[in-house]
């Protein structure tokens, strides 16, 4: 008996297909693993996670699937210290993140917080903003608390 795919699996499949790409089990697998990750992952980290349960999955397949997700707005490429690219799943409409440099946790930044800035860019410079993509790097609240405790 074949199991029905969950709503989230159908949603991932729909988003992959909407990008004009052929829907393959590998693309769904990579998209699901990235969406389930609690932090940004490098392509190698994602490959290592998947390879333990999917030994036939090729490294190049994971890299290509990630790049396709970036191109289709399903994922965002961020830079980790040392110039290593890491990836985080995102909604096509959302492109703002807070990135913890210690634990590598990624949080969505509410776009409403940027509205006053965007209005002032328009009024001050006469520049109309069509699209924004912002990543703010620092320490999350948990890592800041841990730093304060360690400092004494």
Image (tube, grey):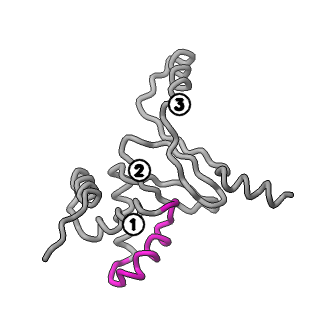
Element marked by disc 3: helix
Q: Residue at x 60, y 44 (%)?
A: 136
Read off the residue under disc 3.
114
Proximity of marks 3 and 2: CB atoms separated by less than 8 Å = no
Q: Judge the density around disc 2: few (<14), some (14-19), many (≥20) Cα neighbours within 10 Å.
A: some
Read off the residue under disc 2.
90
Element marked by disc 1: helix
State yes or no: residue 44 in magenta: yes
Q: Residue at x 45, y 70 (%)?
A: 46
Element marked by disc 2: loop
Q: Judge the density around disc 1: few (<14), some (14-19), many (≥20) Cα neighbours within 10 Å.
A: some
Left or right: where 39 falls relative to 36? right
Read off the residue under disc 1.
33
Q: Residue at x 53, y 15 (%)?
A: 123
Q: Position of residue 48 (x, y in %)?
A: 46, 77
Left or right: where 84 falls relative to 94? right
Q: Which mark, residue 18?
A: none
Q: Judge the density around disc 3: few (<14), some (14-19), many (≥20) Cα neighbours within 10 Å.
A: few
- Magenta stretch? 38-58
Report how far apart the C-alphas of labels 2 and 1 lie in the structure: 13 Å
State yes or no: residue 92 in magenta: no
Q: Position of residue 67 (x, y in %)?
A: 38, 59
Q: Is residue 33 above or below residue 131?
A: below
Report how far apart the C-alphas of labels 3 and 2 lie in the structure: 18 Å
């Amino acid at each position: 008996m074949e199991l029905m795919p969950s709503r989230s699996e159908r949603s991932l499949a729909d988003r992959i297909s909407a990008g004009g790409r052929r829907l393959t089990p590998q693309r769904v697998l990579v998209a699901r693993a990235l969406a389930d990750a609690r932090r940004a992952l490098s392509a190698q980290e994602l490959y290592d996670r998947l390879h333990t349960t999917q030994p036939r999955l090729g490294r190049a397949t994971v890299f290509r699937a990630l790049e396709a997700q970036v191109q289709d707005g399903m994922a965002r490429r961020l830079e980790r210290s040392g110039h290593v690219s890491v990836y985080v799943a995102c909604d096509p409409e959302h492109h703002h993140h807070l990135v913890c440099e210690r634990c590598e946790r990624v949080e969505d930044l509410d776009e409403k917080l940027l509205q006053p800035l965007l209005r002032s860019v328009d009024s001050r410079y006469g520049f109309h903003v069509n699209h924004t993509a912002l990543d703010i790097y620092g320490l999350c609240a948990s890592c800041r608390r841990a730093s304060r405790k360690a400092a004494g």
